[in-house]
Image: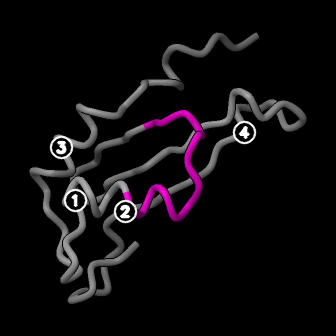
Amino acid sequence: MYELSKDDEIIFVKWMDNETISYIGDDFIKIHFIELDLLCEISSGYGRKAIINKLLKEKVLGLDGKFNEEKAKRFVKKYDENITNRTVRN
């Protein structure tokens, strides 16, 4: 996602299959706030539209297209589930 007044990417969203392609129960969404170098991992109960709505509702992205760094930090504290670091890999 890009801030409307700039060409710099500010948020990168990636849907992760947690290395289990045939099992969707452990899928999650990784949101990278690029300028802040912050990651937020959320269980995949959300689609693309729901993630954008959540970013708007939490005022990380304003209706005017502006990015709010403080709200992004709060978003990570509120929603990050730290999935990668608590997943056992064999």
For disc 2, the marked residue is: 11
Residue type at mark 4? Asp
Q: Are marks 1 and 2 in contact (CB under 8 Å)?
A: yes
- For the point 67% across and 35% down, which residue is it? 27
Q: Position of residue 34 (x, y in %)?
A: 32, 57
Residue type at mark 2? Ile
Q: Secondary structure at mark 3?
A: helix
> From mark 1 to mark 3, how far is it between C-alphas?
9 Å
> From mark 2 to mark 3, how far is it between C-alphas?
13 Å
Q: Residues within 10 Å of mark 3 (few under 14, many from 20)?
A: some
Q: Earlier in the sequence, mark 4 or mark 3?
A: 4
Which contiguous range is marked in magenta?
Answer: 41-53
- For the point 84% across and 30% down, which residue is it? 23
- In the orientation shown, which residue stands out farthest toward the right? 22
Nearer to the camera, 65 or 45: 45
Q: Position of residue 36 (x, y in %)?
A: 22, 52
**Disc assigned to residue 17:** 4
Residue type at mark 1? Val
For disc 1, the marked residue is: 60
Q: Residues within 10 Å of mark 1 (few under 14, many from 20)?
A: many
Q: Position of residue 25 (x, y in %)?
A: 73, 28
Image quadrant where one finds the N terminus: bottom left
Please indicate whether residue 27 sits to the left or right of residue 39 in the image: right
Residue type at mark 3? Lys
> From mark 1 to mark 2, how far is it between C-alphas?
10 Å
Please indicate whether residue 88 sits to the left or right of residue 60 in the image: right
**Disc assigned to residue 73:** 3
> From mark 4 to mark 2, how far is it between C-alphas?
20 Å
Q: Are marks 4 and 3 in contact (CB under 8 Å)?
A: no
